[in-house]
């Protein structure tokens, strides 16, 4: 398996523009997580899905952020409109929640570095 | 409130010396504890976890962690550090069946 695949790796945009980040989880994993990493706030959980259903979106900063998982192999995180304070590295991670050995063992993607000017 | 703390922003150690990266936690019930490592420009990678059993857990790359219930700690250790161990280390605790919270991270710098 190629691991968790995220795109784009880098995105530079201007304030007010829409940003869409994409994630392909590991095949067979039933959990998908979106995290944001900044120097100031560390690693924050934004939202996570189980079997394509959003379970907890309490970490989503505000209504400008939305996430979808239309099928088991694809998820998006959208920011509209974007603001400079959204600049961060966004990570997608997946895990196999149903197994004792796999539960809570997250496999992270390489991240999408977003810069909003 | 359930939480995890890494009291040191950075740990410096000479190559060949033992290293310790500290983590303390606060959870209700029995803790499920984890260590992850992040190399530059990469996502986090799983190192090891404690669920139950032996208090000393062995993980990847020669790392181990010691669970101490009385001190509510889960410190990461390695007997002999390598320059290639230099990275950002995160402790995490499970706060519900499917959710982890991460500490703020500790940067480990191993000097030749």
Image (spheres, coloured by chain):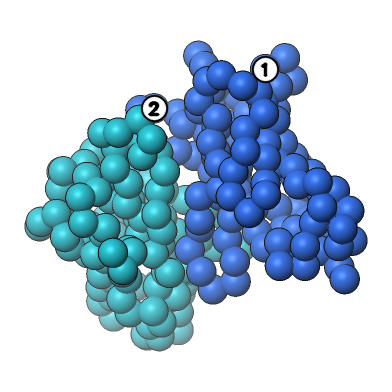
Q: Quadrant of the N terminus of chain B?
A: top right
Picture residue at 41% right of the left edge, 82% below the top = A10
Mark 1 or 2, nearer chain start? 1
Element carrying mark 2: strand
- Above or below, A21 against A108 in this view is below
Q: What is the quadrant of residue B95 in the picture? A: top left
Q: What is the quadrant of residue B82 in the picture? A: bottom right
Give the cyan chain's letter. A
Which disc number belongs to residue B96?
Answer: 2
**Position of residue B23 in the picture relative to residue A68 (left or right):** right
Cβ–Cβ under 8 Å for marks 1 and 2: no
Query: Residue A117: x, y in percent?
Result: 45, 84
Query: Residue A94: x, y in percent?
Result: 32, 52
According to the picture, the residue beneath numbered tag 1 turns out to be: B69
Q: In this rendering, does residue A7 appear at all? A: yes
Q: Chain of mark 1?
A: B
**Position of residue B23 in the picture relative to residue A104 (left or right):** right
Give the blue chain's letter. B
Categorize mark 1 by other alpha carbons within 10 Å: few (<14), some (14-19), many (20+): few
Picture residue at 43% right of the left edge, 69% below the top = A110
Which disc number belongs to residue B47?
Answer: none
Q: Are marks 1 and 2 on the same chain?
A: yes
Q: Quadrant of the C terminus of chain B?
A: bottom right
Element carrying mark 1: loop
Name the residue nearer the viewer: B53 or A25: B53
- Above or below, A26 against B70 in this view is below
Picture residue at 87% right of the left edge, 58% below the top = B16
Name the residue nearer the viewer: A117 or A7: A7
Query: Residue A21: x, y in percent?
Result: 28, 71
Name the residue nearer the viewer: A77 or B31: B31
Query: Residue B99: x, y in percent?
Result: 39, 36
């Amino acid at each position: 398996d190629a691991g968790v695949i995220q795109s784009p790796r880098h995105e530079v945009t201007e304030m007010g523009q829409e940003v869409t980040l994409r994630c392909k989880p590991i095949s067979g994993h039933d959990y998908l997580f979106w995290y944001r990493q900044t120097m100031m706030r560390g690693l924050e959980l934004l939202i996570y899905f189980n079997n394509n259903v959003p379970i907890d979106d309490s970490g989503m900063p505000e209504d400008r952020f939305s996430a979808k998982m239309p099928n088991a192999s694809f998820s998006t995180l959208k920011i509209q409109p974007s603001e400079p304070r959204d600049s961060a590295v966004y990570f997608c991670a997946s895990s196999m929640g149903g197994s004792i050995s796999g539960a809570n063992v997250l496999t992270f993607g390489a991240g999408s570095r977003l810069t909003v000017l | 409130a359930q939480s995890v703390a890494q009291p040191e922003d950075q740990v410096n150690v000479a190559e060949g010396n033992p290293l310790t990266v500290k983590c303390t936690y606060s959870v209700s019930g029995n803790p499920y504890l984890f260590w992850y490592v992040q190399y530059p420009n990469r996502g986090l990678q799983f190192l090891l976890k404690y669920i139950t059993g032996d208090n000393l857990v062995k993980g990847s790359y020669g790392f181990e962690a010691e669970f101490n219930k009385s001190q509510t700690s889960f410190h990461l250790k390695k007997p002999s550090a390598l320059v290639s161990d230099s990275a950002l280390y995160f402790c995490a605790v499970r706060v519900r069946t499917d959710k982890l919270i991460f500490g703020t991270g500790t940067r480990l710098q191993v000097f030749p």
